[in-house]
Image (cartoon, coloured by chain):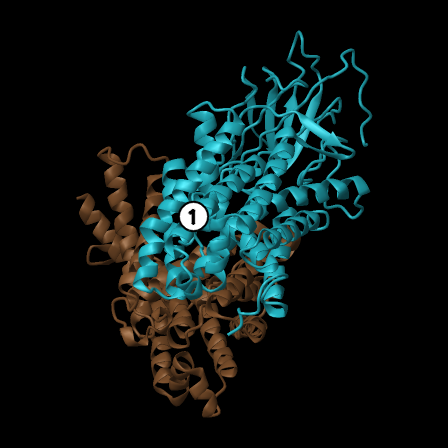
Amino acid sequence: MALLDALLAAGQQILSPVTAAFALAAIGLNIHFGYTGLINFGQAGFVAVGAYGFALSVVWLELPIWLAILIAFAAAAVFAILLGIPTLRLRGDYLAIVTIAAAEIIRYTVNSSLFDDVTGGAQGITNNESQGSDYSSWLNQFNPLGEGRIELGPWVFTGTALWWSIVTWVIVGIVTLLVWLLMRSPWGLTLRGVREDPDAMASLGKFDSGIKLQALILGGVIGAMAGILYVLPSAVSPIDYNSRMTFNLFTIVILGGAATILGPIVGSIVFWTVLVLSEAMITWLVDIGILANFADAPQLRFALVGLALALLIVFRPQGILGNKKEMSFARS
Amino acid sequence: MHHRPRARSRAALAVLTLLASLLIPSLAATTASASTDAEWGFIPRLVDADGEPVEGALVTVANADGELAETTTGENGNGDTLAVPDEGDYVLTFDTSAIDASFDGGDVYAVARTLGEANTLPVQRVIVTLEETANDGEVALGEDGEIDTNTSTGSSTGSASVTFDQFLQQLASGLNLGIVLTLATLGLGLVFATTGLTNFAHGEQVTIGALAAYVGTTLMSLPLALAAVFAAGVGAVAGWAQNAAIWKPLRKRGVAIVSAMIASIGIALMLRFTFAAFFGSTTKRVSLEQSERWSLGPVAFPASTWIGAAAAAVVVGLVGWWLMRSSTGRAARAVAANRALASATGVNVEKTISSIWIVSGAITALSGVLFALLNGVSWDMGFKALLLIFAAMLLGGPGTARGALAGGLAVGLLTEILVLWLPSDMKYVGALAILIVVLMVRPQGIFGRAERVG
């Protein structure tokens, strides 16, 4: 029975907007890391820029929704340019440190009491119509499902929750299609060329710094889009955008298969399913007394994420769908 | 001085120590529904001038909405945990009027605290010393910060006018943080210089040291100094074991530097969340011993801080000497400079690297003990320090004692001095900005070689 409940919960997690948002952020990261070979450890920063850019534009500046979305994208592009111009020439591991530092600066800044009046500090931004701070009711106007209870086989949703799921996954689908077209295009091939042999590309007049910057912007804007999806059904909370979000995204990209179109989606679904299942398993182990001495046993599921990441990168860097030939980062 | 010390019959009146413990939410935080199981609170503690616990004080916690909870200090001086619903600004009031007999009670002390600031440790050990000074419960909500308790509870840092004494105290705090960082930075830099590994699991080596010291003082009842030695030993074993079990096999496999770096993130997550599972998300004090406060001019720290900083400086010097003078140290520098050449000239590369990991593990664990004295022991304390350590290493250049010292002191000073003008939840931003600027302007650091661009 407990197993059945866990499987049902895992199934429901697959449809969740969080899974979709992580898939989308991973698609952006895949453009950086998978296709272009950029070790961006600051993807959580792009997600935060999107979430805050959008929510603040609506709640604080009271701008129309379409403009708020554009501002979120523009902010991510600006962040990519500010970050990319000075740093893209750095070696992989240094780029990783710089990007993680930049993302942490963003998180500390939006979290700080210094800008409390605007960002809400550590409290973040409320998303509740009755409290006068709301940025997602506009989307509910288009909800054709109503707010009532909807049963989908064994799964029960509220109409609103199912509507969020549909919207977020449709967006993930559209972006995936666009990325697929883009990666087949000459521009997409240039990305791989820069990853594999920047000197050869330079001899063809395609200089790696420009191409890398374009890739950083594109993946960053997709990350910002993920940030909007991530906060639409909930509130904005600054602690969410810590570096663990980035590491989870890396696990998702590598698990699904870097430099593949469907890898981030498969990775996100497997990642969240396993997380939900392992939580159920840990709870069960605590109940039968095996892990009873732990102060906070459910944390072990994130230890499992770490173990999975370490084992994957060493023994199967191409993940589920990838091709080992494309894993340029794994070549010494 | 906002409040004149009251004339009292006893010369030394009351030393009040507040142990404000903020319990962070167990970090299920990347899921959207995360913040529901957040636990926030304070653990109050009251002691007198001799550090003896004081029983029977009524402690209340209030925020803008009014009083939330109360407790009475027990015979160990501690009250029960005062749970509060959420992060935010709170005032704790210690009312000593119910205390009789030897303690000359009657004063009311109020302390303002803010829960939920980023980049402070989840449970902050804040020792407030109100020598002969009570403020009758008057303190403004949200008037947070390092309360400079030697003068008055009413004063708060971060205000527009910074006194010279405050500046000196922060300067000293910066030097202290700097020397603690130097140890961890040297540990990271030695491994980086000899193996090329950008080790994201280095923060967990810091945590291991703090946890070992905590085990030493609580379970094994060791005095703090012996617990620190024990922690260094545990750190040395952990460093050796990590190299033998993970990094040596990966080097043999020829795993690329980027893959190794990502693997180190996996190891870091694994260790960190295992600590969280075992240890819980609370912050604990490494030692319940009360440490006397020693003053040097306007600068005052607990004695353990002075001794710890001096010990750290000695250890940094010893490691520097070991690197320059001992045969293993020379071999390590040879491996760092050119591994193939070192190997060809008869240096046993793997044995040297193993020694480096042992030294790195020991000194990093020691820095963990000193971090724990500053901010308490918590499962993610090392990770929170990691970017500061990276910043210090990149600033000074990896692999030398003087580089680690220069980088560590610079980052420590910057971090603590910023607190004078910025809220403490922004203090790490300066170090992170330095990190970026250094990699842009002088990627090889102050003393390093130009090889990071490419």
Looking at the figure, which quarter contains the N terminus of chain B?
A: top right
Q: Residue at x 68, y 19 (%)?
A: B49
The location of residue B27, given as percent across then percent down, is 43, 47
Label 1, on which residue? B355
| In the rendered image, the vertical position of residue B453 relative to residue A5, given as above or below | below
The location of residue A321, given as percent across then percent down, is 25, 71
Q: Residue at x 33, y 73 (%)?
A: A327
- Is residue B73 toward the left or the right of residue A222 in the image? right
Question: Which chain is brown in the picture?
Answer: A
| In the rendered image, the vertical position of residue B49 relative to residue A55, given as above or below | above
| In the rendered image, the vertical position of residue A107 relative to residue B177, given as above or below | below
Question: Which secondary structure lies at badge 1?
Answer: helix
| In the rendered image, the vertical position of residue A281 relative to residue A119, given as above or below | above
Residue in front for this viewpoint, B289 or B48: B289
Question: Which chain is cyan in the picture?
Answer: B
Q: Amino acid at mark 1?
A: Ser
